[in-house]
Structure formats: structure tokens, C-alpha cells
Amino acid sequence: MATGKRLIGWVFIAVAAPFGHAQSEVYKCPDTSGRPTYTNVKRATLGKNCTLVSKEVSVVPAQAPARAMQSSAAPGAATARNENRRKILESELQNEQQLLSDARQKLAEQEGIRNGDERNYSRALERLKPYHEAVNQHSQNIEQLRGELVRLR
């Protein structure tokens, strides 16, 4: 039974292999107006002045080069934009600091509570895990916001 399945698999590979190779060839054919058309069908190239472009063609468009800052932009606009960004970051930093102090307070409250079913300390740690994660998350956010402010100055 297993040898029969293997035989069928090898026959399928032997039959399908030539078709996979034929589709990877791309031909460039000029039309009547001179514009190039591309095809991977060899029969469509008969009787035309077609050339083999490549066996593999990338269809991903090229990325446009990054523009440098235009000279027509006013220097005051960039300063105003940076000042606006600084205000937003400082506001977010104050908000995160408030959230961090709230999270630390909640963690301290929860650490003072000991439920009856938490005789094992690992259960207490499991219950406190979300509070520790919240404190860590707000601390990381504050560090990132301070880093952004340093890079902005």
C-alpha cells in the first residue's frame, strides 16, 4: 500500500515538473504601437519579435527614493512641529507617570491582602502577576517616552 502511494507521488512529480519550469520563463514582445508586452506563454510568442527576458522576473515595484527635506519648507515649520511633538510627549509622560503610581498603589494594596486559599505562596504570586505586569509595562513606557524626548532635543 505504501509503495503504491510512493509510486503515485513520483509519477505526479515527474509529470508536473516540466510545467513548473515552463511558467518561469518570461518573454518581452513589442506590440504594433511599440509598447512592450510580457507573457509567459511560449505559444503567444510565435510569429512575433519576442525575446526571453529572464527566467525569473520580480513583480515587486521598485521603492521610490526617500526625499530629502525640501528647501522650500520653512525652517519655522519644523521647529513648530518639533515643539508640538514635545508637548504631546510630555503630556503622555505625565499620564504614564500617573498610571505607574496608580499601578504601584494597587500592587501594594494587593500584596497586603492574603486570601484563605493562598496557603501556598505561589498562588499569591499568581494572583499578583497582573499587577506586577502593569507596573513593568508603565515603567517601560516611561523609559521609552523619556528616550523620545531626549532624541527630540
Image (spheres, rainbow, N blue to C red):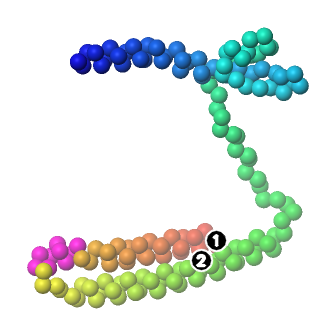
Q: CA distance from mark 1 to mark 2?
A: 10 Å
Which residue is rendered at x = 64% and y = 71% of the image? Answer: 152
Q: Quadrant of residue 101?
A: bottom left
Query: Is residue 147 depicted above or below 39 in this figure?
Result: below
Tell me which amino acid carries mark 2: Leu
Q: Which residue is mark 1?
A: 152
Magenta stretch holds residue 119? yes
Q: Position of residue 147 (x, y in %)?
A: 54, 70
Q: Position of residue 129 (x, y in %)?
A: 28, 74
Q: Choose the circle earlier in sequence order: 1 or 2.
A: 2
The boundaries of the magenta stretch are 118-126
- Residue 53 in view in this figure: no
Q: Quadrant of the N terminus?
A: top left
The reply to whether dot 1 and dot 2 touch (C-beta < 8 Å) is yes
Q: Toward which corner of the image does residue 138 lie, by quadrant?
A: bottom left
Tell me the residue that label 2 is attached to: 89
Query: At 87% across and 22% down in the image, what residue appears?
Result: 32
Q: Residue at x 69, y 40 (%)?
A: 61
Please provide percent x and percent y for residue 37: 77, 26
